[in-house]
Structure formats: structure tokens, C-alpha cells
Amino acid sequence: MHKKLFIPGPVEVGQDVLNKMATPLIGHRTKDAIALQQSISEKLQKVMRTQNTIILSTSSGSGLMEGAVRCFTKNRAAIFSIGAFGDRWYKMCVANGVEADLFSSELGQITTPEMLESALSTGKYDLITITHNETATGIHNPLKALSEIYKKYPDVIVCVDTVSSMSGDDIPVDELAIDVCITSSQKCLGLPPGLAIAAVSDRAVEKAKTINNRGLYFDYVELVKFVKEKPYQYPSTPSISHMFALDYQLDKILEEGIENRYKRHCMLAQIVRDWATKNCELYSDPENLSVTVTCITNTLGISFSELNKAMGERGYLISNGYGALKDKTFRIAHMADTTEEEIRELLKNLDEVIVELKAAQAK
Amino acid sequence: MHKKLFIPGPVEVGQDVLNKMATPLIGHRTKDAIALQQSISEKLQKVMRTQNTIILSTSSGSGLMEGAVRCFTKNRAAIFSIGAFGDRWYKMCVANGVEADLFSSELGQITTPEMLESALSTGKYDLITITHNETATGIHNPLKALSEIYKKYPDVIVCVDTVSSMSGDDIPVDELAIDVCITSSQKCLGLPPGLAIAAVSDRAVEKAKTINNRGLYFDYVELVKFVKEKPYQYPSTPSISHMFALDYQLDKILEEGIENRYKRHCMLAQIVRDWATKNCELYSDPENLSVTVTCITNTLGISFSELNKAMGERGYLISNGYGALKDKTFRIAHMADTTEEEIRELLKNLDEVIVELKAAQAK
């Protein structure tokens, strides 16, 4: 039995989108492939609200995150972490000999404007990375407030991980002056995993050209060159299947509308938060809760593995806590094309399962 | 109209295999995903004839090639190039600060055992890279003869690019003592592009652990750790769709049998070579012709673009020359699941198109 996915990626993907993955292939240097990549780029610029160059990467989002710190750091990177994925960005710096410092917030707390100001005012950093939405704890950083700080430092390249929020949350890339905005197919975009995406500013690319040891596969200079000069090509052989599905899904996203999509995510998040407040506790800073995933402190007196097993038997998959929060919390994702009806159905089943498991315990 | 692909990747993929790309997704940390990766690994060990650890990478083959020179070179790499893809391997060394020397053969010629002996006997190199099959020129290196040389240097890590030959040509990985054997989904394996594969020896991984600056996404130590210790997982979110299709296609490959698959590729190659000899000229060293792609010197008096256009109208795609050979040659791939009937049909159409175009010229 297929389990419907309410985990923070991969998300449940509609069968119509999945079917596009089965499209017969085309040569990746043909006019058809160029037209496909151009179409995707133009639609993604609308979804991401940016004029920056769109690059595709056949990889998970991690690949482009790693490429970003290699390509755009000349002096030193300031890595702001609000959980597992910020920590991973720091690990990437270490693994590539990129000089960096890690600024961690407590789990469940945001990166504050004060933290950013305090680091940037030292003048030591020419690149910052921010995790927009942290699936480990279910919070999102206040990008608008943070942008007011980093905009005061025009020589700093701003990289933002929007892997688990782009096209769900409200992220106007150009308004926020994000130089390198990275996302991935298997979250709010509602596609299978296997493709990463970035919107990259010209000034970032110009800077990268002056930096050595950028590598090749995730070299933004090379990726942008193939988009701008070829044009609309990919340096090696890309996942054409994902491109077919993405092009199709972007039409559906634009048809719903970016603003409507954001509102729907907010509405779904509120339903899950209400459930969590009633039945358990919300794990994170209530002022900055994610609109794409909710992290819930497990106060049910039922272990997650029991809960998960019972939900699995009903055809649903939710997620345990991440890393240090593995046993303390569980997570429900409300991303991509999830409807109000679907999230209510999930929670109804969760209610029933909890009653059953408590009754079994009482025996 | 879909054009049937006779280009050296992506190859034509059967609709049954394509349909597997549309399988509903599963969580990448679930038991089902672990079972899927284990199943793929065990089947790939049979196809690649190796006991080494199988790793999957959501990327093109280039990604794992880049990772290999970063992870396994401690002193200096000797890069043996027989064309575009060997040159790319050298470019990867430069782009990552890996000390390396490039040993190029003339286009259309192999890497000779003498070249290998001469380089390795200096004692300067602790890693070599060999392109097994070069799609730019349609030749394959004599791996057996080369292995007799490098086996004399047990401290050298041997990396072989079999991207365009594995599961088409005869490559018994363990018998050939290949430490890092890299291939890719969209060539002889008969799948869509988007997944790379490597078989990695334990001694290579042990060596990598002593090397810094390996990066993260293509870090073989990390990839192997997730396979061996988790077990059978992937560090980030992999392309689950490709894994479904690969698992299915590997059954078909094993059903045909490795030896039969090799014989079929030899038979198809011979048909195309015979056609080329009759109508044009073979471009490369006749002693070392590839069994997966044939590179043909265009002596037709018809430009490739004319030929390509006319073939396109009939629903076929063949390939122009690569790089410096762009206008001088064209290429016909005979990879993956292509049948004798299909290749004869292609050549029949090519014959007809040539007659038509010559008649038009004569007018």
C-alpha cells in the first residue's frame, strides 16, 4: 500500500506530475531541450519573483549549497544555523577548505537581526548563509527583518537556503536582495527529488570568477555560462525527466498563483498548529513558526514508532524528530499541493489512532 | 513527433522503464527505500562483476568523476585522456586543486600500455584515471592490457570511467582490479539521465579517509558510510524515481545476461561499422573500436545538419561530431536495449535519406 507522504520531503506528488517523469527522452543538446530549459527558467523567475539567472542542478539541494560557499566566499563565510541544515552548510565549508564561522541559534529559535548585525559589523565576512525554513524544528527565519541588516553591507554575498519553503512561503527574492537563493524539487514545488534550483545574481557570478578552487559540477560560473551563452543548456547531462515534470508543475503553480499558494500554506499550517496545541505542544518559537512544516513536542504518552506504525497501516506517513529531537518531537509537513481536506483527513486519522493506542495502553 | 535516440546518451528508453519513473514516492529514510537501495546494489554488483561497494549519486557521471580525483589523490594524479571526457577529468583536477598531469593520446587512438608504464614507473602518481570508452571518437581502451601494467603498482588507485560502456561492453571490474569504476544511468544501462553509479574498493575508501578537502556531496567516504553503516541509505535525498526505474531495469539486464548483452552490443557495432566502411570511413583506430558507439568520418558530400534534419523528419536522432570533430564526423550509438531490427531500420532510413539528398544536390 502506498503511504501518503506528510513528511518534510519528499512530498506527495500528483499522479499527473509523476506521469510527466515518464515522458520519452530528448537529446540534451537539441532545440527541444533548450526550449524546455528556457520555459522552466522563465516560469521559475515568476515563482521566485526574481530577475536573476535560474540554474538547474541534477542533485539534491545540498549540492548547490556546497557549490555556493565554494564559489562565492573569498575571505570568510558567516554561517547562521537554526538547526540541522545550517550545520550541514558549515560542514560543507570545512570539507572544502572554505574559511567560515558558525553562528548557531538554540534549537527552535531563529537567527536574529542582532546576531547578523553583530557578525557583519566585524567586517570579516564577505558571504553569509541563512537557512530560511528549518524542517528539523519547524521554524522560519524573518527574512524581511534580516534583509534590512544585510542590505547595509553591499559587499556581502547573501545565500539563502529556501529548499523547504520556496513556492510555499512568502519569498520575494529580488525584494529581499538574495544573491543566491537555493531550492529543491521535492518540497513545496511538489515534484520528485533529484533536481535542485538556484536564482543567482550577476554580481555574485562576477565575484565567483575571481575565486579559485570552485570545483566543476557545482561551479556556478560554469552553470550560468551554459544558461547565458549557449543559451539555456546544462554543462553535463541533466535529468530531463525532472525537467519535463517541473515545466508542467510550474504551470499549475502559476495558475494557482504565488499569493494564493502562500495563503493556502498558511491556512494548512494553522490547522496543524491548532491540532498540535490542543493535543500536544508546539516545539518552537511561536512567533516564527514555519508555514510548511510543524514540529510537535510529543506529550501523548505514546512513542512515535507506535504512532507511525498505526498511521502507516492507515496509509499515511508522518515524520519523527530530526537529530537530537528524534524521540522528543514528531513532524507533520503541509507542503506543495496538499489540500485542506487532505490535512483534515490526516489529523482525523491521527486522532483515531491516538484514541486506539491509549485504549490499548489502558488495558 | 518523438525522435528515436541513437545518440551516445541519453539513449532511447523503453516505455515500461519510463513508467517506473512515475511510481508514487516513498520516504528516503523508510525501510522500503533501504530495501530498494539494497536490491539495486546487489544487482549492480552482478552487472559490474564486483564485490566492491556500490554507491549511487544523484548527478551525472561527471559528479562522481570529480569526487574520485578529490577523494583518492594524495600525491599526484595521472590523467590518461583519449578525448573530451579524459580532458574533462583533468579540468576537474585543476578546478579542485588536485595535483595532476595529463597524458593525451591523439584523437582516435587509445591509451597504450607503454604510456601507462612510462608514467607509473616514475613513482610520482598515486592515482590514475582511464576513460574506458570515448564517445567523442568511438574507441575503447584495452582494459585487460592496461590492467596488466597497473596491477604491478599496488599503491596506485585505479579510477575508470565506464560511463558509456558499462553493461554494454565487457568489463569485469574485480578481475580488472578497478578501485573506482564509474558509470551513469543514461547510457548502456538504458535509463533516463540523472543517476550516477560507482563500485568502490575498500582500500580506496580507507585511503580517502586520510585525505582532506574531499568535499561533501561527492565524498566517497560519506557515500560509502551511508551504504555500509546505516545501511543502504543515501546522505541527502536521492532521486527515488530513478531508483525505482533502475531496480526494474536491472532485472531485465540480468535476465538477458551480461555475456549476451555484450554479444548483442558487438553484433550491433559490427552492423554499423560495416555500413560505415561501405558508405564513409571509420574515424578511429580499427583495432580498438567501441562496441557502444561508432564515429564515422563524413565523406558523403552532405553536411551533417542536412542529414540530421532529414533523419529527424523520419523520427530518428543521430549525433554530430564532438568538439574538434564536430563537422568532420558523425556518430551512431548502439547502446542499451537497441535491437538488430532497430539498428537495421535506422541504417535503411539513412541510406534512403542519403539517396534523396544526393539526388537533390544533383538537380
Image (cartoon, coloured by chain):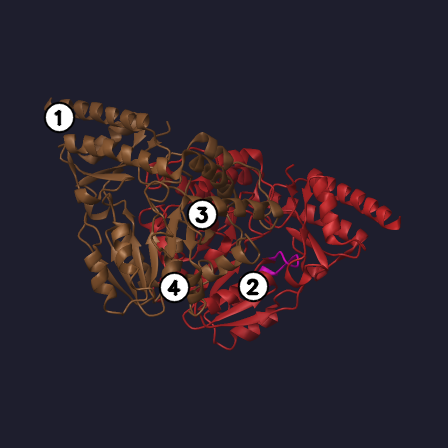
Chain colours: A red, B brown
Q: Which residue is mark 2?
A: A86
Could you tell me how far apart the alpha carbons at marks 3 and 2 are, in whole angstroms?
Answer: 36 Å
**In this image, B13 relative to A162: left or right?**
left
Answer yes or no: do the residues labelled 2 and 1 have beta carbons within 8 Å? no
Q: The residue tagged with tag 2: helix, strand or loop? A: helix
Q: Which region shows up in magenta?
A: A134-148
Could you tell me how far apart the alpha carbons at marks 1 and 3 are, in whole angstroms?
Answer: 53 Å
Disc 4 packing (10 Å; few <14; some 14–19; many ≥20): many
**In this image, B112 relative to B154: left or right?**
left
Q: Nearer the viewer, mark 1 or mark 3?
A: 3
Amino acid type, residue under disc 1 in the picture: Gln
Q: Could you tell me residue A23's position as x and y percent?
A: 45, 33
Tag 1 or tag 4, which sits nearer the N-term? 4
Tag 4 or tag 3, which sits nearer the N-term? 3
Q: Which residue is mark 1?
A: B361
Amino acid type, residue under disc 3 in the picture: Gln
Q: Which residue is mark 4?
A: B72
